[in-house]
Image (spheres, coloured by chain):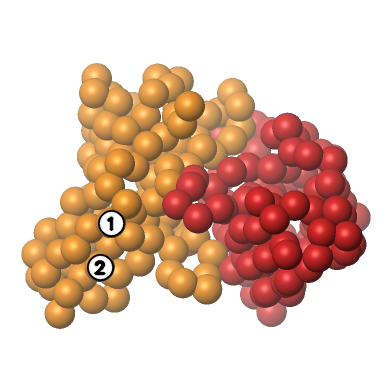
């Protein structure tokens, strides 16, 4: 059973609008949550993270929200740009297990 | 070279072949990882090496054999693979995860493996 789930395999958004990518998790013991971005033929690259004791972290156009009671996090990209088109992976880190657990990814397409 | 490099980028092999995947990190990290990404599935952690010792083996079949000769190099030796082993194999590195604190993992571009 997957501990980190991304239920939307794909998302299309118009340039300039907001992109919202969602992620759900089942393990309440995760310490950090992260978003990675992956372009074709490249490895995933770290985008933004949030500690489990926070509910929001912002970095430029990217904001991650954490709702611990719902075991849900989301990544907001605003405004979306065509260069943001990539696969976005949600991941969770457990300090006790010292491992990252990934979701299956969401393909974001930003239309010009 | 900078970051994390992987060779080869693409590999096609038969089920009776033996091949090796290579990963090299130029970031001064002391932990390295192998992940498997199958289509439409999450990245699956296969092996973790910290300070050149294997600290994690997530129930990976013995036909996959990792080797970490030093903190900069990681190999994945493959033999008698099955077609379902076809996937993207990603290497990553980070600072030592033993402390329990999160240290960002940096990924290589991956090796696209096809087993015929």
Q: Position of residue B39 (x, y in %)?
A: 50, 55
Res B29 quadrant in image? bottom right
Q: Position of residue A50 (x, y in %)?
A: 35, 40
Q: Position of residue B50 (x, y in %)?
A: 76, 42
The residue closer to the viewer here, B99 or A67, is: A67
Residue A78 seen anywhere in this rendered image of the structure = no
How many tags in the picture? 2
Instruction: Classify mark 2: helix, strand or loop.
Output: strand
Res B6 quadrant in image? bottom right
Residue at image coords 15%, 79%: A112
Q: Is there one chain holding both mark 2 and mark 1?
A: yes
- Side of B72 relative to A69 (left or right): right
Q: Position of residue A43 (x, y in %)?
A: 54, 64
Q: Which quadrant: the N terminus of chain B?
A: bottom right
Task: Check contact, mark 2 vs mark 1: CB within 8 A.
Answer: yes
Q: Say if A32 sits above or below B4 in the image.
A: above
Residue at image coords 65%, 58%: B86
Q: Which chain is red?
A: B
The residue wearing badge 2 is: A109
Identify the chain of the residue marked 1, using the numbered disc in the image: A
Residue at image coords 32%, 52%: A9
- The dot on residue A96 is none
- Side of A89 relative to A43 (left or right): left
The residue wearing badge 1 is: A10
| Label 2 Cα neighbours within 10 Å, binned few <14 / some 14-19 / many ≥20 | many
Q: Say if A34 sits above or below B58 in the image.
A: below
């Amino acid at each position: 059973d997957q501990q980190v789930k991304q239920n939307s395999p794909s998302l299309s958004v118009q340039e300039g609008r907001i992109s919202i990518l969602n992620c759900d998790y089942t393990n309440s013991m995760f310490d950090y949550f992260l978003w990675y971005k992956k372009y074709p033929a490249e490895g995933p690259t770290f985008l933004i993270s949030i500690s489990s004791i926070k509910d929001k972290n912002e970095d430029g156009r990217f904001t991650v929200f954490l709702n611990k009671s719902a075991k849900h996090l989301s990544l907001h990209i605003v405004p979306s740009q065509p260069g943001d088109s990539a696969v976005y992976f949600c991941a969770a880190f457990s300090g006790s297990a010292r491992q990252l657990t990934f979701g299956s990814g969401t393909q974001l397409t930003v239309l010009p | 070279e900078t970051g994390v490099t992987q060779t080869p980028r693409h590999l096609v092999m038969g089920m009776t072949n033996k091949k090796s995947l290579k990963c090299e990190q130029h970031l001064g990290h002391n932990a390295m990882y192998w992940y498997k990404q199958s289509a439409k599935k999450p990245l699956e952690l296969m092996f973790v090496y910290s300070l050149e010792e294997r600290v994690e083996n997530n129930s990976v079949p013995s036909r996959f054999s990792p080797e970490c000769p030093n903190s900069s190099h990681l190999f994945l030796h493959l033999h008698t693979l099955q077609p379902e082993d076809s996937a993207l194999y990603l290497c990553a590195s980070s600072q030592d995860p033993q402390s329990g604190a999160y240290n960002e993992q940096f990924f290589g571009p991956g090796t696209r493996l096809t087993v015929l």
